[in-house]
Image: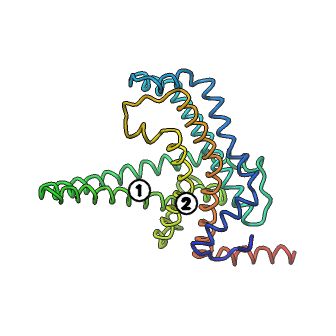
Amino acid sequence: MALPNLRPLSFGEILDGAFTLYRRNFVTFVVTAMIPAAVIVVAFLALGGGIVAAMTSPDPTAIFGALLGGGLLVMVVGFGAWLTVWGGLTHQASEAYTGQPASVSDGLRAGFRAALPMILSGLLAFLGIMVAAIGVFIVMAVVLGIFAAMGGVMAGLGVLLAFVGWCAFMLVASAVLFAVAPAIVVEKAGAIEALERSFALARGALGRVIGLMLVTILITYLPSMAVMMVTGGFSQMMNPEAVPTASQVITQQVLGMGVSILTTPFMVAVIVLLYFDRRVRTEALDVQMMADRLAVAGD
C-alpha cells in the first residue's frame, strides 16, 4: 500500500495499512503507549496500597473497600492517562499516514489538548447510549416475556435473541462513535461537533465499520485472552469462590498491561485509516489535499 497517497481503501487494505503504520512507527507508538502504563504504576504505588491484598482476600467487602479507596483514584488517573495517549496515538497515526513525521513529544502534546473534549464527548455519548439502552431493554423485556410464556425451547431462544440484540446494539453504538477521537485530534472539533462528525462519517457504512471493528477487536484481544488462560483468569471467572494469589494478580496485571501497550497502537491505526477512508469516500478528501498541495507548490 502506497503511503501517503490518499484513496479509497478496501477492507483488507485498511488492516494492511494499519500494520504498515505500526511497523514503520513501532518505537514511537509503543513508547507513547507506555506512558499511561507508567502513570498507572506510579499511581498504584502511591494510591493503591492494599488493593492486591484485598483482591487476594476471600472477603468481598475488602475488595469493595479497596476499589472505593485507592483503587478508584488509580482508575481515574489511569483513565485520564489513557485518554491522553489515545489522542496522542491518533495524532501520530494521522501524521504518519499523511506523510508527516510522527514523534512522541508531538503526539503527547496533541493528546493533552484533546483530553478535555474527548472527556466531554465521552460523557455525552455515554448519556445518549444510556437513554437508547432503556428503549433496548424495554424491547428485550417484551421479547423475553413473549418467548418465556411459550416455555421450553422457546424460552431459551428468547434469551439468545435478547443477547444477540444487545450485542448488536453495542456494536452499532461503537460504530457510530468510531470517528470521535480523529475528529477531535485531526479536525480540532469540539465535543458535540466530534459526535456529529462521527455520525456523519459512519452513515451509510455501518456494516463496514462494524466488520472492521470486530476483526480489530479479535486481533487485539486474543493476546489478552491468552494471558488470562495462562495466568488462570478463566478458571477464576468460572469459579468465583477461587481466591487468586498475590503473584497471580500481579502477573495478570503486568502481562495485561504489556499486551495493551503492544495492541492499542494497532487499534488506533485501524480507526485512523477508516476515518480517512470515510472522508475520502464522502468528502473527496484526497482531491482537496491534492489541490492544496498544488496551490502551495504554485506559490
Q: Position of residue 188 (x, y in %)?
A: 65, 56
Q: Is residue 236 above or below residue 164?
A: above
Which colouring convention does the figure follow? rainbow
Residue under pointer 1: 170
Q: Residues within 10 Å of mark 2 (few under 14, many from 20)?
A: some
Q: Amino acid at mark 1?
A: Met
Assign a secondary structure to mark 2.
helix
**Label 1: element kind:** helix
Relative to the observer, which residue lies in front, 114 or 240? 240
What percent of the width, then of the height, locates residue 88? 68, 50
Q: Which mark is residue 114?
A: none
- The mark that comes first in sequence, 1 or 2, is 1
Pick the quarter of the image with the N terminus: bottom right
What kind of residue is marked 2? Answer: Thr
Q: Residue at x 70, y 59 (%)?
A: 22
Residue receiving disc 2: 216
